[in-house]
Amino acid sequence: MSKPKVLVTRLLPEKPLDLLREHCAVDLYDKHDPMPRELLMDKVGKVDAVICLLTDPMDRGIIDHVEDTTFAAVAPVEAA
């Protein structure tokens, strides 16, 4: 059985990413800045899930584009 494909829109701490990688095929945008909208639009339709931060610009156009994506999550930002 293939692993579900998950898009992570920003860098997250290594422990959660390692756990996610054990169970999923992770497509990680490895920057602290928001993923450019064009890239996000291209990728969201190709994954099973999206993990984003509250500060990521998930507008109506992007949400409408993920109709085949089964799950979207918002990861809270934790103070260091």
Image: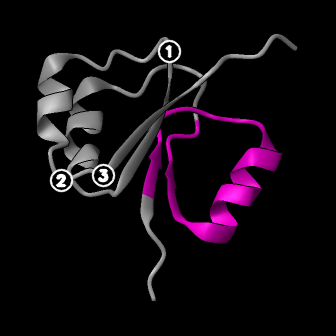
Disc 1/disc 2 C-alpha distance (Å): 21 Å
Above-or-below relation of 61 to 27: above
Horizontally, residue 34 falls left or right of residue 66, namely right
Write down the residue under mark 3: 70
Above-or-below relation of 12 to 15: above
Please state which amino acid type lies under the numbered disc 3: Thr
Above-or-below relation of 16 to 37: below
- Which of 35 and 4 lies nearest the eye of the viewer? 4
Q: Are marks 1 and 2 in contact (CB under 8 Å)?
A: no
Which region of the structure is painted magenta?
6-30
Residue 55 rendering spot, x and y as whole percentages: 48, 11
Q: Earlier in the sequence, mark 1 or mark 2?
A: 1
Residue 61 rendering spot, x and y as whole percentages: 12, 23
Q: Residues within 10 Å of mark 1 (few under 14, many from 20)?
A: few
Q: Nearer the viewer, mark 1 or mark 3?
A: 3
Quadrant showing the C terminus: top right
> For residue 18: magenta?
yes
Q: Which residue is outermost to the bottom?
A: 1
Q: Are marks 2 and 3 in contact (CB under 8 Å)?
A: yes
Disc 1/disc 3 C-alpha distance (Å): 19 Å
Q: Are marks 1 and 3 in contact (CB under 8 Å)?
A: no
- Secondary structure under badge 1? loop
Please state which amino acid type lies under the numbered disc 2: Asp
Q: Earlier in the sequence, mark 1 or mark 3?
A: 1
Q: Residues within 10 Å of mark 2 (few under 14, many from 20)?
A: few
Q: Residue at x 58, y 39 (%)?
A: 30
Mark carried by residue 54? 1
Mark carried by residue 68? 2
